[in-house]
Amino acid sequence: MFIKKIIPTAVLLALFGVTVSGCNGTIDLTMYPDNYSAPETTATENIPAVAQTTQEITSETTPETTAPEPVYGYDFTSSLASMCYDATNDEIIYAKNAGMRVFPASTTKLLTALTAVAYTSSEHIYYVGSEVDMVAYDSSMSWIIKGESFYRDDILAAMLTPSGNDAAYCIAVNVAREVYGSNLTNEEAVEKFCQLMTDYAKKLGCTGTNFVTPDGYHDPEHYTTAKDMAIISKAAVECEPIVNITSQKLVTVYSIEGDVHSWENGNGLFYDPYIEYNVLGLKTGFTDEAGFCFIGAAEKDGKTIITLTFDCDIEYRYADTLKLMDLGFGDYDPDKEYEGYY
């Protein structure tokens, strides 16, 4: 059902050891032909502990009652799936339903950002065009404007800070046309970019991820697992352009044309006055189907902790995160009141 520091470091190094072009390392991201199918990696095939000890909960199953409860059991978090990962010491501190298929909502944008960094330099110019009209009417927006253009890290800020779905589509179309040619339609470009994302996830070691949108807006074929998102989040934490954005409470950028855009970060950890660690990010998410989701990252005393919560009610998104953060940093207090913080 759950894990508390039982996976060997060598195994986790295999799980998380691949880094990214532009993010303190390199990965082979060749521009593949249309009929390319990324090979399955073997990075995670030797870590049965997660699959064997994480209960896969469905409507027909319930948590095991015959085995003794671990110190922090199924009820420790209210999220359907959750994890606490010590990125410094390569230890999974807690895992609940880590292999279960979940909808990632806007946490998807971490992989969107990683793919953009892998394929374009910081000097690459992204042009805002009619692709922003593809965004769903009820999307979160950065309100970038057709005809504007941005350097890569500025368009990443437009996506990651206010969770701009318009920026996500702009990134998808610009990257795909850079890779496959400028004659792609918007729809063709988005489809090819999502394939790049999924291929990239597989190369990182993800085995349960299939992305068909760049922003995470709900689609039944757009899914992942907490374990896979931990792999993606580890890569994001190691990617300087991403962390430079997600570690800021307020981000202001200028388009190349000189227009100013300023966005507040939706990460609730920035607004908790009692937090004693340095917030690094990472990303919120919500759809009706996905529930409330959050991937957090923080640093304290030289240790980096990544927490993941998927599919919970709003009042537990940060409550679960704070519990997992405290657990990861060795500060968990069972008498502390965690609920009620949104």
Image (tube, helix red, strand yellow):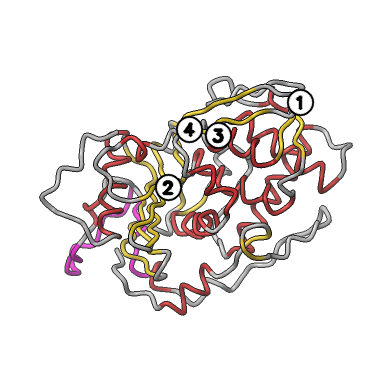
Expressed as whole percent of the image width and height from the top left, the position of residue 50 reads: 39, 68
Residue position for label 2: 295
Identity of the residue drawn at 29% across and 53% down: 324
Expressed as whole percent of the image width and height from the top left, the position of residue 205 reads: 57, 65
Identity of the residue drawn at 68% across and 47% down: 116
38 w.r.t. 314: above or below:
below
Mark closer to the chain start, 4 or 3: 3
The front one of 57 and 209 is 209
160 w.r.t. 80: above or below:
above
Residue position for label 4: 250
Foreground mark, 3 or 1, reads: 1
Residue position for label 1: 129
Mark closer to the chain start, 2 or 3: 3
Count the marks.
Answer: 4
Instruction: Measure how far apart labels 4 and 3 are at the Cα level.
Output: 24 Å
Instruction: Measure how far apart labels 1 and 4 are at the Cα level.
Output: 26 Å
257 w.r.t. 212: above or below:
above
Expressed as whole percent of the image width and height from the top left, the position of residue 330 reads: 24, 62
Which amino acid type is shown beneath numbered disc 3?
Tyr
The front one of 288 and 170 is 170
**Magenta-highlighted residues:** 51-71
Which amino acid type is shown beneath numbered disc 1?
Gly
Foreground mark, 4 or 3, reads: 4
